Amino acid sequence: MSKSKVGKILELFYSTDNGRVNTEELSLDKKGVVEDKYYNKNIQRSVLIASIYSYNLAKKHNIEAHYSSLGENLLIDYNPYHLKPGAKLQIGGLILEISQNCTLCNSLAKVDSKLPEILKDDRGIFAKVIKEAVISKGDNIYLLNEEKN
């Protein structure tokens, strides 16, 4: 299996009953983001990845959305939204498998009523953990490519 560098981690977040927490590192295992309130709820949707592209798209429409308002766990400088389910990303020792595109939710309308329509195809992408690890801000992201024989 080969890998190609595609980007890096800009910000890391997890959700608590008291709101979103920005952190320097995240611990992830097969049940998701260890400290997140959604840990072990839905393995197919255990990690939400958003691209800085989404925030730039909102900004183009004069919407100021602060980082984490899309509900992401990982904010990255690479746009992964074209990746199909089954594609794999490696961050340090962590391996994530893309499971599905993120659906829109009402929480985006709390930021701005136009945001759900603007980000309908560009909100984020869900992944599940294949190999657990601790990741940090600034870590490089690699797209793993299956070797074809």
Image (cartoon, rainbow, N blue to C red):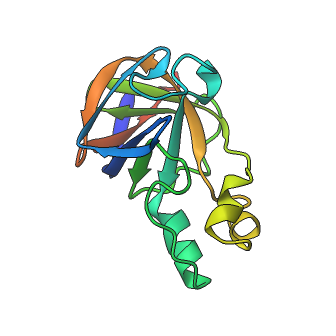
Residue furthest to the front in view is 18
> Which of these two is toward me, 104 or 149?
104
Kindly identify the residue that appears in the image at 50 percent across and 73 percent down: 56
136 versus 59 height, above or below? above
134 versus 62 height, above or below? above
Quarter occupied by residue 38: top right
Residue 6 visible in the displayed image: no
> Which of these two is toward me, 86 or 62?
62
Kindly identify the residue that appears in the image at 62 percent across and 51 percent down: 82
Kindly identify the residue that appears in the image at 41 percent across and 51 percent down: 75
Quarter occupied by residue 94: top left
Q: Please identify the quadrant where the N terminus is shown.
A: top left
39 versus 75 height, above or below? above
Kindly identify the residue that appears in the image at 58 percent across and 85 percent down: 62
Quarter occupied by residue 102: top right
Q: Which percent across, then down, holds residue 53?
A: 50, 66
Q: Which percent across, then down, holds residue 110?
A: 66, 63
145 versus 40 height, above or below? below
> Which of these two is toward me, 3 or 16?
16
Residue 124 visible in the displayed image: yes
Q: Is residue 44 left or right of residue 49?
A: right
Total numbered labels placed on residues in the image: 0
Q: Which percent across, then down, holds residue 122?
A: 64, 59
